Amino acid sequence: MPLDLFERIAEERIQEAMGRGEFENLAGMGEPLRGLEGYFATPEHLRVGYSMLKSSGFVPEEVSLRKEIELLRERVRASRDGAERRQLGAEIQNLQLKYDLLVERYR
């Protein structure tokens, strides 16, 4: 189906739905869209690729590492055991080194 035909059909269906009032009183109507700041902050030539990866559940390794480091830091803050805190600190240092090397490779 040619794109212009598809666009025309889509536009007709939108107009019909608007005529029936299906777009009235929607949640958030008249408010700015939320959650798209990251999308528009991404360079235009990378947006589609990043969106596809995100939709498929892919998480870059550096993001996973940052999350794991933060979880360990929370455990350190919650811990009262000195030995556990030292062990968690060592894990954080190892993950931070791995993260730093990974980020340095991208430069």
Image (cartoon, rainbow, N blue to C red):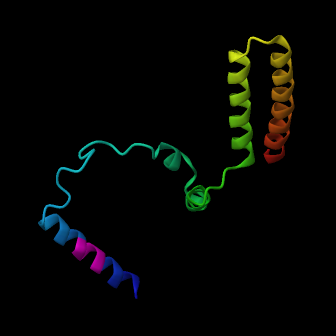
Quarter of the image for the C terminus: give it: top right
Q: Residue 89 appears in which quarter of the rendering?
A: top right
Determine whether 52 is above or below 100 in the image.
Answer: below
Residue found 82% across the figure and 43% down from its top: 102
Q: Position of residue 18 (x, y in %)?
A: 17, 64
- The answer to which of 11 and 92 lies nearer the viewer is 92
Q: Label the magenta part by its dominant secondary structure.
A: helix
- The vertical placement of 72 against 78, above or below, is below
Q: Which residue lies furthest to the bottom in this view?
A: 1
Q: Which residue is drawn at 35% across and 81% down?
A: 6
* Camera-nearest residue between 31 and 74: 74
Instruction: Judge whether 5 appears above or below 31 on screen.
Output: below
Is residue 83 rendered magenta in the image?
no
Instruction: List x then y, in percent, for residue 59.
Output: 67, 50
Give the quadrant of residue 19. Answer: bottom left
Q: Give the range drawn in magenta.
A: 9-13
Image coords of residue 82 (percent x, y): 83, 11
Q: Quadrant of the N terminus?
A: bottom left
**Residue drawn at point x = 69 percent, y = 42 percent:** 63
Q: Position of residue 38 (x, y in %)?
A: 52, 44
Left or right: 21, with 102 as reference point:
left
Report the side of 23 relative to 10 (left or right): left
